[in-house]
């Protein structure tokens, strides 16, 4: 597997870590291709680094990558990290089967993101997917987009959901008492400050939510929110004091925040998967998310779906969840059951099934 490392503080490192642990527990011999040295517990091959060219590690990403794999001689190389210069190596001749995970097709779905750079990236991706042995999509929604927008043969595109880290779990009251004492009642949002994540409508909806529960707070965890400070103040005025932002927290702290929150509010405009939805469910947190793309796929029947372009709809349904204990408890129960589908062993078994199909086992 390559190229994301095993750092559990970011999404693709966490996915690589969980698949490695899952597959090895299923008696598979797994190596990770990495540009960085990894902990000795992981079998891995570190790429030999070469000097960069015009600010890019092209020689390392292409040729060191290729010759490292040739020496390792695996049955399958699963490229998890969509790093475009490194992924071009997949077009080189090899004896092993090649699989690539596609996490989303944002620039093709939301055309306002299709700038010159993304046009090139999407052209490269289409070129690659037509020349490798199989593509893994992280949701049925993303699979449909790969088939329809990139014209990839449907028989070569498989769905394997992202696994949830077992660190996301239900905690007891004592374990979260410090968070509740510090912040009181709050709604949680986990997303970076990015137009795709719908920050303005998140903040606008909080203005309405505050009318149904005046002591409620909004806790946001995500990078780059320092750039949203002025927007929050402009939209909320005095209410902005009830918005608490953390650009980075530890995994342990994030688990506590999920558990202590009244609900996860995740009104993104587009996702290829939407990991916070499953993390919240696994933590026993009710989920309120968008009524489209993979978010509907993950949460329909297990969470509350909202129109992300309508702050009043977001607020009305959020208020219903946080003010109706029976509904909140129902969502907690359903979410915990849904999260079991994303257990890393179960998902690794599905991934192994794809590997065997590609190898004609």
Image (cartoon, rainbow, N blue to C red):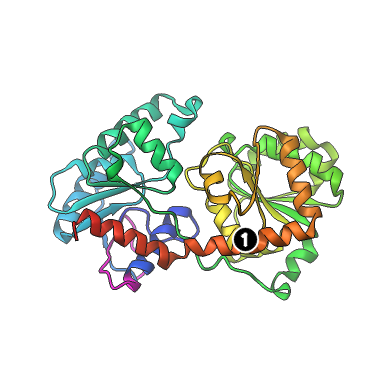
Give the x, y percent position of residue 45: 25, 61
Give the x, y percent position of residue 253: 63, 64
Image quarter of residue 93: top left
Is the residue 130 above or below the residue 187 in the image? above
Image quarter of residue 162: bottom left
Q: Answer left or right for 131 relative to 159.
A: left
Q: Answer left or right for 257 relative to 269.
A: right
Give the x, y percent position of residue 350: 36, 60
Is the residue 220 above or below the residue 46 in the image? above
Q: Residue at x 44, y 25 (%)?
A: 115
Q: Residue at x 50, y 59 (%)?
A: 9
Q: Residue at x 43, y 41 (%)?
A: 142
Give the magenta part as a residue range: 24-40
The answer, for residue 361, to whether it is visible in the render is yes
Magenta region includes residue 348: no
Q: Residue at x 56, y 39 (%)?
A: 292
In-front residue for pair 224/276: 276
Query: Which residue has dot 1 on it?
Result: 334
Is the residue 20 above or below the residue 242 in the image? below
Q: Secondary structure at mark 1?
A: helix
Few, some or many residues within 10 Å of mark 1 (<14, 14–19, 20+) = some
In-front residue for pair 360/20: 360
Q: Quadrant of the N terminus?
A: bottom left
Q: Quadrant of the C terminus?
A: bottom left
In-front residue for pair 199/160: 160
Magenta stretch, main secondary structure class: loop
């Amino acid at each position: 597997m390559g190229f994301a490392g095993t750092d559990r503080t970011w999404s693709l490192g966490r996915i690589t870590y969980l698949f490695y642990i899952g597959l090895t527990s299923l008696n598979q011999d797994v190596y990770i291709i990495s540009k960085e040295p990894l902990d000795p517990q992981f079998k891995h091959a570190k790429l030999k680094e070469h000097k960069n060219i015009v600010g890019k590690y092209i020689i390392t990403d292409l040729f060191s990558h290729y010759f490292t794999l040739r020496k390792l001689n695996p049955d399958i190389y699963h490229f998890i990290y969509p790093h475009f210069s490194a992924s071009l190596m997949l077009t080189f001749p090899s004896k092993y089967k090649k699989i690539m995970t596609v996490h989303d097709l944002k620039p093709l779905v939301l055309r306002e993101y299709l700038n010159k750079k993304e046009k090139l990236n999407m052209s490269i991706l289409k070129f690659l997917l037509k020349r490798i042995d199989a593509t893994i999509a992280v949701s049925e929604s993303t699979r449909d987009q790969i088939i329809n927008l990139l014209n990839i043969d449907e028989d070569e595109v498989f769905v394997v959901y992202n696994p949830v880290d077992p660190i996301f779990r239900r905690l007891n009251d004592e374990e979260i008492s410090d968070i509740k004492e510090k912040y009181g009642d709050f709604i949680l949002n986990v997303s970076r400050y990015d137009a795709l994540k719908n920050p303005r409508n998140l903040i606008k909806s909080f203005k309405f939510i505050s009318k149904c529960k005046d002591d409620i707070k909004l806790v946001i965890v995500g990078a780059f929110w320092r750039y949203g400070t002025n927007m929050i103040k402009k939209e909320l005025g005095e209410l902005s004091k009830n918005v608490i932002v953390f650009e980075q927290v530890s995994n342990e702290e994030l688990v506590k925040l999920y558990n202590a929150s009244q609900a996860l509010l995740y009104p993104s405009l587009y996702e290829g998967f939407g990991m916070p939805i499953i993390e919240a469910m696994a933590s026993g947190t009710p989920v309120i998310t968008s009524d489209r793309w993979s978010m509907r796929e993950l949460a329909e029947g297990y969470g509350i779906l909202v129109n992300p372009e309508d702050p009043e709809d977001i607020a009305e349904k959020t208020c219903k969840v946080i003010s109706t204990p029976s509904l909140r408890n129902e969502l907690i129960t359903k979410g915990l059951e849904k999260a079991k589908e994303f257990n890393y062993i179960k998902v690794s078994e599905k991934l192994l099934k794809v590997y065997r199909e590609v190898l004609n086992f």
